[in-house]
Amino acid sequence: MNPEIYHIPANYTDAGRILGVFEIRNVVEAVLLALPTLYFCLALLPLALKAKLIVTIVLVIPVGGFALIGIRDDSLTRWLKIWRRWRKRRRILYFRGEVTQSWD
């Protein structure tokens, strides 16, 4: 065996992921967002069981799916941190020059 050759397994990118697709951080965020939504839908809605299930499915699946996917391959908290930093550091540019019009 040549010491210069390294064998990389086919699943090396699966490390730190659940089912090889979702990052652990995204799964934790999805659970933290979906469980309270699930609880409030089932406990507080004054509807029949069938209607509660339909409303719960309509709300919980998109919330959990959005948290699993994230924004631009980032988790929601990481994206929110970047967005807050951008909002804090942005500046407004003012034009301080002179506007001249030429109608020649």
Image (tube, grey):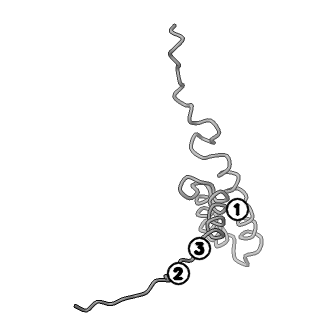
Q: Position of residue 11 (x, y in %)?
A: 55, 31
Q: Secondary structure at mark 3?
A: loop
Tag on residue 33? 1
Say few, some or many: other residues with alpha carbon within 10 Å of mark 1 (under 14 / 14 to 19 / 20 or more).
some
On screen, residue 73 above or below 11: below
As displayed, is residue 52 above or below residue 10?
Answer: below
Frontmost of labels 2 and 3 is: 2
Q: Position of residue 7 (x, y in %)?
A: 52, 20
Can you identify the residue that label 3 sits on? Answer: 91
Viewer-nearest of discs 2 and 1? 2
Residue 81 location, quadrant: bottom right
Q: Which residue appears farthest toward the right when viewing the image?
A: 43
Q: x%, y% of residue 70?
A: 58, 57
Comparing 28 with 46, the one in front is: 28
Residue at mark 2: 94
* Mark 2–mark 1 distance (CA, rounded to whole Å): 41 Å
Hey, what amino acid is under mark 2?
Answer: Tyr
- What element does badge 2 sit on? loop
Percent x, y of residue 96: 50, 83
| Alpha carbon distance from label 2 to label 3 | 10 Å
**Picture residue at 73% right of the left edge, 58% below the top:** 32
Looking at the image, which residue is at 76% across and 74% down?
Answer: 44
Task: Inspect the image, locate mark 1, and give the three-letter code of the amino acid beneath it.
Answer: Leu
Residues at marks 3 and 1 touching, judged by CB atoms closer than 8 Å: no
> Mark 3: few, some, or many residues within 10 Å (few <14, many ≥20)?
few
Q: Residue furthest top?
A: 1
Mark 2 vs mark 1: which is more N-terminal?
1
Q: Nearer the viewer, residue 28 or 97?
A: 97
Label 2 Cα crowd, 10 Å radius (few <14 / some 14-19 / many 20+): few
Rendered view: 88 above or below 104: above
